Amino acid sequence: MGRSLRITLFVLLLLVVLIFGLTVGRQVFLSSSEPAPAPDLSQYNTYVYDQPRELAEFTLTNEQGETVTRDSLKGRWTFVFVGYTNCPDICPAAMANLRRTNSLLPAELPRPDYLLVTADPEHDTPEKLKAYTGFFGENFHGLTGDLDTLRKVAKSVSAVFVHREVDGQLLVDHSGHFALLNPEGKLQALIQPPHKPEELVQAYERIYQWAKANDPRASGA
């Protein structure tokens, strides 16, 4: 075999090895870069979106009287609940469950905010929201403002509310689930009742770990 033929065969062999290596490397890269599917948390009455959903744009007022927009919710995880301070049963129980959840969170998880979006802005002034949410903890907050805007925000987190009057008293029928927003301010999960604080902690931890593995920005505040 001539020297030039041996060199040609050697070069061809190197090319085959190189192409094979690039092919394998590309497959490994693609498989490792593909996001893992959202965890199945049906045992916790929780649905996790593979692709988080944008909230409607809004301008509302928080319990401090400050203007809040969609961008204000970025940078941390947030549990959202649609209710009202005069609610006789569902809301106090829901807020108490969130307070208990907050107390059970392990130190390694980012501390979320808890946001009450009022379904009764006529009565739920910033001052009233401050007194109500402050009872549950310093990271509990409220939003009030224009009724149509509140309906739009509620719809963004798959919630609805309806006003009705009984014996001259306003009652509000509303959804009872929690919505979980990720640090990009997008809807990441819906958690249906019944709500058990221990299971809420488990669901939140699973969602956080999954999100962090797919996107380091999910660490939140």
Image: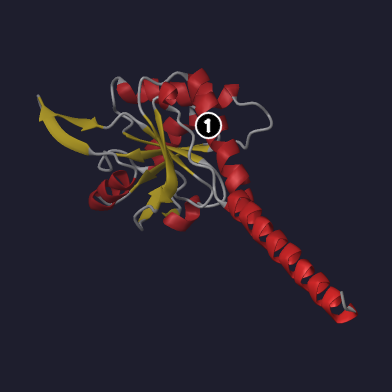
Looking at the rendering, in which quadrant would you find the C terminus?
top right
Does residue 175 lie above or below 7 as drawn? above
Q: Secondary structure at mark 1?
A: helix
Task: Please indicate whether residue 209 sits to the left or right of residue 195 in the image.
Answer: right
Compared across the picture, whether 177 is left or right of 30 comes to left
**Which quadrant of the figure contains the N terminus?**
bottom right
Which residue reaches farthest left?
A: 167
Q: Give the residue number, with chain letter if any, for mark 1.
A: 204
At x 64% / y 55%, what residue is drawn? Answer: 29
On screen, residue 116 versus residue 78, left or right, reads: left
Kindly identify the residue that appears in the image at 30 percent across and 19 percent down: 89
**Is residue 206 in view from this perspective?**
yes
Name the foreground residue: 176 vs 192.
192
Q: Residue 218: x and y, percent? A: 59, 47
Identified at 79% across, 68% down, the residue is: 14
From the top left corner, tell me how far across and down residue 4 is, in percent.
86, 81
